[in-house]
Image: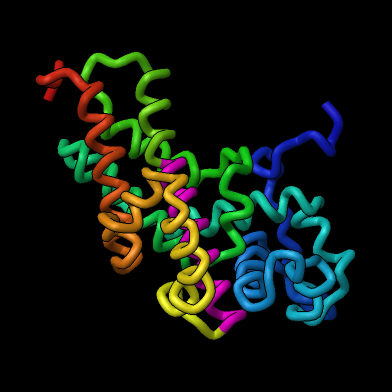
Amino acid sequence: MTDSNVSIWMRPEQVQRSGPGRRPGYSRAQITAIAVRIADADGLDAATMRRIAEELGTGAMSLYRYVPRRDDLLDLMVDAVTGEIDLPGRPSGDWRADLSLVAHRSREAGLRHPWSVSLARRPTLGPQSLRVFDFALGALDGFGLPVDTMTTLNNMVVNYVDSAVREEIGWLEHARHTGMDRGQWMAQYVGPYVSQVVASGRYPMFNRNIREGRLSHQPPDVRFQFGLDIVLDAIAAVLPDLPLSE
């Protein structure tokens, strides 16, 4: 295995200690925190080693001993954001409450760092990602389910959160660019077109959605909870009536 194929999590931390006549040392955590701050302010593409080095007052090349590759930096950034998902040390025993907690805390972290949605499907096995995964699967343990089934059920929650946060961030970005919120944009631009489509009578289910639908007019947190409840209901249908262990 070449050095370039070694996971960042397998590389020992290279800390340059400060001393007389020497530059101060840095750490992965320090570099990652600056990268996250830059990405929050100016987008993911702005979080380069050169920009991070400027923030630290050093040269970019000096940071590669800590974070050798761009992919390593992205993995560290993903894990840092995942570290903001505050969870108890172990599941409570109420699987629905535990998975709901993971979902809501994940949504909060994603909304704090909009750039992170582009990395949400990135395969990384950092310590924080493993911590959240272990908690979620632990919430489903004790029902006698194969681990593949538990993983798939957890993925249903993860994928729902990812999709919901992407949509919510998309609307926030649209509002920032246009100066109009979701309701204003739909009324001004979509409304006339929708009226034309409804009048055509060609799409009866779409017409029904327009007539009867209420969810699109609700606040984002209400829409999120509505979808999450459906996902959790689907998981409940798979679980046995009684757990096999306490």
Q: For the point 62% across and 67% down, which residue is it?
A: 36
Residue 67 in magenta stretch: no
> Quick one: 47 or 7, which is closer to the camera?
47
In the image, residue 213 above or below residue 38:
above
Q: What sort of colour scheme is used for the picture?
A: rainbow
> Quick one: 197 or 73, which is closer to the camera?
197
Q: For the point 75% across and 57% down, which residue is it?
A: 66
Quadrant holding the C terminus: top left
Q: How many labels does the image show?
A: 0
Magenta-drawn stretch, dominant element (helix, strand or loop): helix
| Magenta stretch in the rendered image | 158-178
Q: Residue 32: percent from the left, percent from the top?
A: 64, 63
| Side of 112 relative to 103 (left or right) | right
Residue located farthest toward the front when viewing the structure as drawn? 200
| Side of 139 relative to 220 (left or right) | left
In the image, residue 194 above or below residue 137:
below
Q: Residue 95: percent from the left, percent from the top?
A: 21, 36
Which of the 4 quarters of the picture holds residue 133? top left
Q: For the point 34% across and 37% down, which residue is it?
A: 136
Residue 90 seen anywhere in this rendered image of the structure = no
Residue located farthest toward the bottom when viewing the structure as drawn? 179
Quadrant holding the N terminus: top right
Q: Residue 196: percent from the left, percent from the top?
A: 49, 62
Q: For the point 31% across and 48% down, which residue is it?
A: 227
